[in-house]
Image: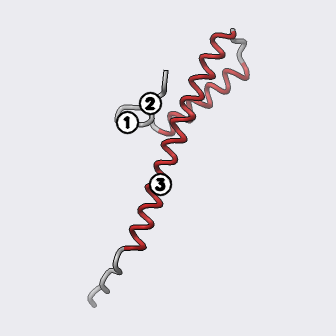
Amino acid sequence: MPAPTGPPGGPSFAEQLERIEEIVRRLETEELDLDEALRLFEDGVERLRAARERLSAAEAKVKQIRIDDLDAPPAPPAPG
């Protein structure tokens, strides 16, 4: 089951990271049967993928803003 990638009402980036950390802790410390461990692992991979996509989208947005700023004409000097 894919994790939400950040649409309205979905988990935030920070919430995704917190859940990934929780999954890692459970996989490292708890005695889990194979099916439960596999389910947690799959959930963690999906959440990691969603978080990376969100991070890449944010990085692309920042780059575009910087390009737009470089291409914009200089602001007129302030009166005074």
Helix, strand or loop for disc 1: loop
Q: Do callouts 2 and 3 mark residues in contact (Cβ within 8 Å)? A: no
Going by the numbered disc 2, the residue's amino acid type is: Pro
67 vs 40: above or below: below
In the rendered image, which residue does mark 3 sit on?
Answer: 60
User: Where is residue 58 drawn, in percent x and y?
Assistant: 47, 50
Name the N-terminal-most of marks 3 and 1: 1
Q: Which residue is mark 1?
A: 7
Q: Which residue is mark 2?
A: 4
Query: What residue occupies the far left of the structure in this picture?
Result: 79
In this rendering, would 31 be left or right of 40? right
Give neighbour class at mark 1: few <14, some 14-19, many 20+ (Cα, 10 Å).
few
Q: Is residue 13 above or below residue 68?
A: above
Residue drawn at point x = 26 percent, y = 88 percent = 79
Q: Residue at x 59, y 29 (%)?
A: 45
Mark 3 residue type:
Ala
**Mark 1 vs 2: CB contact within 8 A:** yes
| Amino acid carrying mark 1 in the image | Pro
